[in-house]
């Protein structure tokens, strides 16, 4: 894998050179992980004029979370609590006779930025912007394999929950059980706090589980994600508890399902991100739910759960092949509940079969 990380750093170095910077300091953890292979906590990466250095503080046995750093990197360990790795990296850049350093201003604190200027006053600091995030959007097959395995894990965890007795159990209890099942099936952990919502809470985006107990006739919406080797995926489903669904539940579910299908079918290389959002949003709008619509229809994911591209009304840009995204429309009706349906897919051209669906748990409206 060393050549993969070297190639990523080479692409980034070309961008830096084109912008007039001889070196770059990468401090955002997901970006360090992407370029270095793995890194201890709080590590930074220096793309230097003469060599690339992974800088971190802590004892020698401070191990990376996922695997080992690329062995072509030089490791520079600060003893004990020996200061800020970013400041040490700027000092190393000066020692390599760099006169400019690109930094991730969107990640640096004001205090850290000031410290860099103090330790290396002759370095010209430039903004790297989202250059690394842009490189991360399109995934290679190894990355997609990790997302795919994570999807298999969330499908397993959710499927097992659906086979258990749910009535009388609390949202909080069910969320904790799902997160335990994720780890049991090989996940590093949950990709985000698991959302289990029942009754009037169902369908609410980002709902934090409460002690409300599952009751007969409730909508039950679940949204969970897994991390596998650092890569995230997610799934969301809605069910009815105990009895045949009411007419209003069937009507609302069918509408959200149609919107989700429209969004999935719009995924294609070259499709405008805002058009994917529009495809799903128009279905919900036609049902009279314009005021209840979420701010976006989906988003990219990978080393972080919320990455570019954003599938939203004002989103810019077009989709590329080999980009994992979510399609997750929903409607929440205050006091009644609602529906969310969420899949992780990979954008693929029609010649390759179109969008690759990774989360395969049934989307049929089941009565559990």
Image (spheres, grey):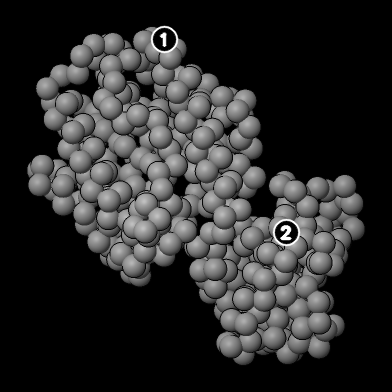
Q: Look at the image and tell me in which quarter the C terminus lies.
A: top left
- Residue at horizontal 54 percent and vertical 51 percent from the top: 144
Image coordinates for residue 260, horizontal then vertical, percent: 27, 43
- As drawn, the label of residue 1 is 2
Estimate the spatial distance between the alpha carbons at disc 1 and disc 2, rounded to whole Å.
Answer: 45 Å
- Element type at marker 2? loop
- Residue at horizontal 26 percent and vertical 25 percent from the top: 365
Position of 237 relative to 216 (above/below): below
Image coordinates for residue 145, horizontal then vertical, percent: 57, 47
Position of 304 relative to 173 (above/below): below
Give the crowd class for mark 2: few <14, some 14-19, many >=20 residues within 10 Å.
few
- Whichever of callouts 1 and 2 sits on the residue coming sooner in the sequence is 2
The answer to which of 55 and 368 lies nearer the viewer is: 368
- As drawn, the label of residue 216 is none
The mark closer to the camera, 1 or 2, is 2
**Horizontal side of residue 54 vs 161, given as left or right:** right
Question: Does residue 299 appear in the picture of this structure?
Answer: no
**Horizontal side of residue 122 vs 268, given as left or right:** right
Image coordinates for residue 312, horizontal then vertical, percent: 30, 58
- As drawn, the label of residue 165 is 1
Task: State which quadrant residue 14 falls in.
Answer: bottom right
Task: State which quadrant residue 289 falls in.
Answer: top left
Question: Does residue 37 appear in the picture of this structure?
Answer: yes
Question: How many numbered markers are drawn?
Answer: 2
- Element type at marker 1? loop
């Amino acid at each position: 894998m060393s050549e993969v990380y070297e190639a990523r750093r080479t692409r980034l170095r070309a961008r830096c050179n084109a912008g007039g910077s001889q070196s770059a300091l990468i401090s955002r953890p997901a970006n360090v992980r992407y370029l270095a292979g793995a890194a201890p906590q709080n590590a930074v990466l220096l793309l230097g004029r003469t060599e690339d250095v992974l800088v971190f503080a802590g004892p020698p046995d401070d191990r990376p979370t996922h695997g080992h750093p690329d062995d072509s990197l030089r490791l520079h360990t600060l003893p004990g609590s020996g200061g800020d790795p970013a400041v040490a990296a700027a000092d190393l850049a000066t020692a390599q006779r760099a006169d400019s350093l690109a930094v991730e201003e969107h990640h640096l604190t004001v205090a850290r930025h000031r410290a860099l200027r103090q330790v290396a006053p002759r370095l010209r600091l430039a903004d790297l912007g989202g250059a690394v995030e842009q490189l991360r959007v399109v995934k290679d097959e190894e990355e997609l394999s990790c997302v795919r395995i994570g999807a298999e894990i969330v499908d397993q965890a959710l499927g097992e929950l659906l086979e258990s007795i749910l009535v009388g159990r609390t949202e909080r209890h069910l969320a904790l059980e799902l997160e335990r099942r994720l780890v049991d099936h090989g996940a590093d952990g949950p990709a985000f706090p698991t959302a289990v919502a029942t009754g009037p809470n169902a369908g609410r985006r980002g709902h934090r589980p409460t002690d409300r107990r599952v009751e007969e006739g409730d909508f039950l919406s679940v949204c969970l994600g897994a991390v596998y080797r650092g890569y995230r995926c997610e799934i969301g489903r809605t069910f009815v508890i105990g009895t045949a669904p009411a007419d209003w539940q069937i009507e609302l579910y069918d509408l959200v399902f149609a919107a989700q299908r429209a969004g999935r079918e719009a995924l294609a290389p070259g499709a405008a991100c805002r058009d994917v959002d529009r495809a799903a949003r128009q279905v919900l709008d036609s049902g009279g739910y314009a005021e209840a619509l979420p701010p976006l229809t989906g988003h990219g994911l990978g080393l972080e759960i919320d990455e570019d591209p954003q599938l939203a009304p004002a989103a810019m840009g077009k989709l590329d092949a080999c980009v994992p995204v979510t399609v997750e429309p929903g409607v929440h009706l205050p006091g009644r509940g609602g529906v969310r349906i969420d899949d992780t897919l990979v954008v693929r051209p029609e010649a390759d079969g179109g969008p690759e669906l990774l989360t395969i748990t049934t989307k049929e409206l089941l009565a559990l």
